[in-house]
Amino acid sequence: MQRVTQPPRHKRRGRTLQAILSGLLLLLGQTLAETAPLQVAVISDLNGSYGSTDYEASVSAAVARIIELRPDLVISTGDMVAGQRRPHLRRPQVERMWQAFHAEVSEPLATAGIPLAVTPGNHDGSAYRGFAEERAIYAEQWGKRAPDVEFLDRQGYPFHYAFAVGDTLFASLDATTVGHLPAAQMDWLRQVLARHGSDYRRRVVFSHVPLWPFAQGREREYIGDPALQDLLASADVDLFLSGHHHAFYPGSKDGIALVGQACLGAGPRRLLGSRLKSPKGFTLVRLDADAVRITAYQGPTFATAIDWRSLPPHLHSDAAELQRADLAGTALPGHVTESTVMPGGKQLVGQQTLRTNAHGRPLTVSGALPARAGFAR
């Protein structure tokens, strides 16, 4: 009988230790993947004049900066091209605009492996009478460019649809007109949130037209439906992202962060009650386990963040009052550090702990107190 030779004891121990370490590394990798914050860049209102196929330098600079930041997802809250003109643009003109947008935005993001999820703006695919062909072209363009995400409901894509990335549910609304959403779309959103909402740690809804006003000159251009606000609150939606008003504001109402986007194209606007125009910019949302953190990077280099304390603590309109999200406890500025400089050269130091947010999570951000004493937030 042939004798079976066992490997030396020290080699057996080595293999056992190697197996244990491999298992621990695998477990650690899975844990990090599950707990890593999800980062989402939000771009909006990139277009120029009616029919234009040219984009301002701010658009390509923002796209380059986003690629540098490597978010998990990019969302466009609409107005990617410059349609909705009267007299109407012809199909070849509209198609050339989309070709230019894809060359400037879609293709660089795709090459970088970053999915792009869109929602229509009034200049992309308006639901107002007379723009059916532009809506059809919008559907054609994005039907062949669906993002690489887990769709939960894509029947209405690329207008209203739902998908998931990591532990976050996203829902796009088709809001290109002023006023309440159609009853059928409200029913759809209600069903999506009821069916899938509890399966995810975070819930984000986005549209072009905002729920409530942000900017001067757009005071009447909003959805303005208390029933939609109530639905978002009852479904524990964390964040509602919108465009159209061309001004960044991290607002809050009824425990929901309502974030209006700056524009990247033409026409920055003033926030309600403000004398200063909002700078061009894009938003980076970080969805942590304990908080929603939001940074707006401003042009021309998009290396500097807008300091939230330069923004009004409240926005007042006939429709609603929005409170700044950090004061309401629904979201935090994402990248406030000791190197952040306020207007006038004041340095930020120290640490401030805010009260718990709407879901009872503690909110903490470093570098949120000014160097001089007695500064009122």
Image (cartoon, grey):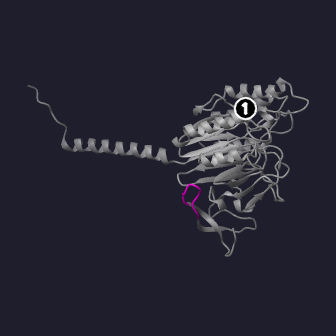
Q: Which residues are magenta?
A: 354-362
Residue 186 shown left or right of residue 149 in the figure: right
User: Does the segment drawn in magenta span residue 121?
Assistant: no
Q: Amino acid at mark 1?
A: His
Q: Return the x and y of residue 338 as percentages of the image width and height.
A: 62, 64
Q: Which class describes the residues within 10 Å of circle 1: few (<14), some (14-19), or many (20+)?
A: some
* Occupied quadrant, residue 367: bottom right
Among all residues in the image, which is located at the extreme bottom?
373
Q: Tell me the residue at 81%/49% (across/down).
A: 268
Residue 213 in the figure: left or right of residue 365: right
Q: Give percent across and percent down for residue 149.
A: 58, 34
Q: Residue at x 79, y 47 (%)?
A: 245
Residue 355 magenta-highlighted: yes
Q: x and y percent of residue 176 in the render?
A: 77, 37
Dominant secondary structure, magenta? loop
Eyeballing the image, is 226 above or below 97?
below
Q: Position of residue 159 (x, y in %)?
A: 70, 32
Mark 1, secondary structure of its residue? helix
Q: Is residue 155 visible?
A: yes
Front-most of residues 300 and 217: 217
Quadrant location, the N terminus: top left
Left or right of 288? Residue 59 is right
Residue sitting at the far right: 87
- Split into 4 quadrants, where in the image is the C terminus? bottom right
Instruction: Residue under label 1, please give it.
Output: 102
The quadrant in which residue 276 appears is: bottom right
